[in-house]
Amino acid sequence: MIRTYSKIAKLALLVIFLAIVPSTWVLAGGVNKLIATDSSGVAIKGYDTVAYFTEGRAVKGKEELEFVWQDATWRFSKAAHRDMFAASPERYAPKFGGHCAMGMSMNKKVAADPEAWTIVDGKLYMKRNKAARDRWRQDPATRIKMAEDVWTELSKQN
C-alpha cells in the first residue's frame, strides 16, 4: 500500500521538526567552520559573545545591534561590543562554533546553553548545561584536547 500525504501534513511535520531541532550546523562562509545558529541564523541564541569577556556574565544581545560573520548573525548588548567583535571575531567567538564543548569532547554534536560557559586561556567554551560545565571544569585541558581533535575532523568533513 502506498501512502500519500497532503501538503499541509508535510508542512506540519516540517514545522514540528524545526521546532524540535535546537540548533543547526551552518557551513560558514565556505571556511570549514560550523556555527551553531537557530532557525533564523542567529548565533548562540542571541547572546552577546563579547560580554562574557568584558562583563564576566551571559548577556542577551539586541536585534538592533547585529553583525553578520561567517553567515551567522551575532547579537550584542552594546554598540561597543559589536565593534569589538567586528574588529576581532576570532578572539570573541566561542570555540567549536558555539556548540557544547563537553559534548564535542565526547564526539557528540550537542546544542549549548549560553548560560553554561567557561573561559580558559582567553577562549570561550559553552556547555549544554551547568552540570556539563561543572564536569568539564574537572579536567579542562584534556577535554579541550579531545574536543579540538573532534572539531578538526568535523571541519574536514565540511
Image (cartoon, rainbow, N blue to C red):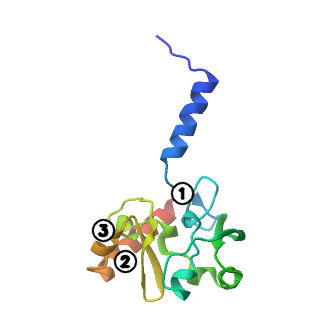
Residue under circle 1? 25
Question: In front of the other: label 2 or label 3?
Answer: 3
Q: Residues within 10 Å of mark 3 (few under 14, many from 20)?
A: few
Dot label at residue 58? none
Residue under circle 3? 131
Front-most of residues 132 and 33: 132
Front-most of residues 140 and 153: 140
7 lies left or right of 139: right
**Residue visible at 64% across and 76% down?**
77
Q: Quadrant of residue 60?
A: bottom right
**Residue visible at 43% across and 89% down?**
121
**Residue visible at 54% across and 57% down?**
25
Residue 116 % position (x, y): 41, 71
| Vertical position of residue 20 compared to residue 77: above or below | above
Amino acid type for the residue under numbered disc 3: Ala
Say what secondary structure mark 2 lies in. helix
Amino acid type for the residue under numbered disc 1: Trp
